[in-house]
Image (cartoon, coloured by chain):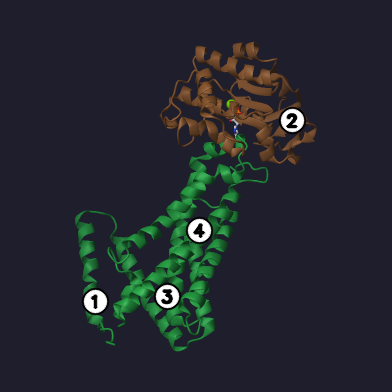
Chain colours: A brown, B green
Amino acid sequence: MFSIKQLVFKDIITVNKLEIKSGKIYCLFGESGSGKSTLLKMFNSMLTPDQGIIAYKDQSITDVDPVQLRREVVMLGQDPVVFDGTVRDNLLIGLQFADKADVEDQVLIDLLKDLHLKKDLDKEADKLSGGEQQRLAVGRVLLMNAEVYLMDEPTSALDEETETAVMDLFTKKIRDAGKTAIMVTHSKEVAEKYSDEIIYMNDIVTNEGALS
Amino acid sequence: MNEMLEITIWQLVTAYIFIVILLAIVRWRKIPREKEIIIATLRMTIQLVLVGYVLMFIFENEKMIYSIIVIIIMETFAVYNIYKRTKQTLSSELKKIIAISMVSGTLFAFLYFDFIVVQFSPWYDPRYFIPIAGMLIGNSMTGITLGVSSLVEGFSSRKKEVEAALMLGAPPNKASQGIVNHAFDSAILPTINSMVGMGIVFLPGMMTGVILSGAGPMDAIKYQIAIMLGITGSVSLSVILFLYFGYKTFFNKHAQLKL
Ligand SMILES: Nc1ncnc2c1ncn2[C@@H]1O[C@H](COP(=O)(O)OP(=O)(O)O)[C@@H](O)[C@H]1O
Ligand SMILES: [Mg+2]
């Protein structure tokens, strides 16, 4: 699905080689500041490497229209974002951004329940707590029906029990639909429990200058 | 028609008592503004006297080229003033768009006003051309200044929101829609407010001028309505042009936010 060769971005990361296969769940694992978020943003053209190639379905990412690419390779950023409006508005806004059709309220209600978020659809979203906002942001992404999901620490603000519920739901949805996911996590347990393959930043990131 | 009352130099001097009062107040309250007040008063006086001489010359030598030179100076000053009044640093791309939208928006509205609404004769008659161009340009300048600040501020304070939208597959125009709409709103709000208060809260300068020069109130009001509509058109047009092209300068060719 993705193939990275000799990628360099500023002096932040250098990746010699990395393959991402379709239909699998990957975890990016590494210490804080090791460039996980930076690398993740390369997969959907939120950042463009200074050197090297990222191919998506055998085509260089720079040749793909970035907006179309992001509709297939959807991303949840590290800091959950809440938009103006209600919980419903916040769930649907991703579909509207991507010109996709809205879904029924019942779908949203079921989704909230799966995320352990017992909130009314008409509640103002900025009234939610940090952890609730994070689940709202996860829900918004899960509605997108994408090919690839890039999730940057999707459960960082959640307690263990809620984290398990969210990860169970998310990985089940992805596996059932045969989609691909690359997620960043701090937790070794989460990485081992939910992913098919762990990508250690230490292994793929060569030291500065190692390429030349 | 009755002629306008003459003010003698000495009567005018007595009006400066208002500044003296203001100076006394700030000195009493120990507000450190004396220097600015004196400078502002001096500048106002000197600038108006100079403009008076320039206008006198232009009105006496009614020539197309003079009207055109004046409008070019006004546009240049307005654009420069927008750059100066915006506190944030502006990219050169954005500056170019400010200049283009300012000039084309005001010129389009002004020429429509000149040739279709009022039909000055000749079209460059400086008695109409200069003050009306000045009003349209001045108001558009204020509008774009507000729009620029709001746009730049919006992109910096709502950066995370724009990025989140992009990550979900939003094209740049959708990702920045909230910021752009807010900027448009804050840019045209003063114009809308001044229409609401028109005639009740204040008699605008244009009308005051027409009445003082001896025309009947109804004539003055017709002018005022026309000019207010012209101002609204000019402000909205220049602000829309600015925002429509301006937001794009915040994105690069990969639809990423420039930092
Ligand atoms: N926009 C940026 N410009 C320059 N340096 C950055 C930028 N974003 C992040 N960095 C730096 O890049 C490194 C990796 O950051 P990041 O990808 O966020 O790491 P992680 O997600 O693994 O914690 C950090 O040292 C960070 O300070
Ligand atoms: Mg990170």
How far is the residue under mark 2 from the one under mark 3?
Answer: 65 Å
Chain of the residue that carries numbered disc 2 in the rendered image: A
| Label 1 Cα neighbours within 10 Å, binned few <14 / some 14-19 / many ≥20 | few
- Please tell me whether mark 1 or mark 2 is closer to you in this view: 1
Label 3 CB, ligand 1: below 8 Å?
no
Of the 4 image quadrants, the one containing the C terminus of chain B is top right
Q: Position of residue A43 (x, y in %)?
A: 69, 31
Q: Secondary structure at mark 4?
A: helix
**Mark 2, residue position:** A209
- The residue depicted at 67 percent of the width and 42 percent of the height is B254
**Mark 1, residue position:** B13
| Label 3 Cα neighbours within 10 Å, binned few <14 / some 14-19 / many ≥20 | few
As drawn, the label of residue B131 is 3
* Same chain? Circles 1 and 2: no
Question: Who comes first in sequence, dot 3 or dot 4?
Answer: 3
Quarter of the rendering containing residue A170: top right
Chain of the residue that carries numbered disc 3 in the rendered image: B
Q: Position of residue B35 (x, y in %)?
A: 31, 61
Three-letter code, disc 2: Gly
Q: Secondary structure at mark 2?
A: loop
* Same chain? Circles 2 and 3: no
Asked if one can make out residue A27 in the rendered structure from this viewpoint, the answer is no
Q: Is B232 above or below relative to B252? A: below
Question: Who comes first in sequence, dot 1 or dot 4?
Answer: 1
- The residue depicted at 43 percent of the width and 57 percent of the height is B188
Name the side, left or right, on which B176 lies relative to B8: right
- The residue depicted at 30 percent of the width and 77 percent of the height is B217
| Label 4 Cα neighbours within 10 Å, binned few <14 / some 14-19 / many ≥20 | many
- The residue depicted at 73 percent of the width and 27 percent of the height is A15
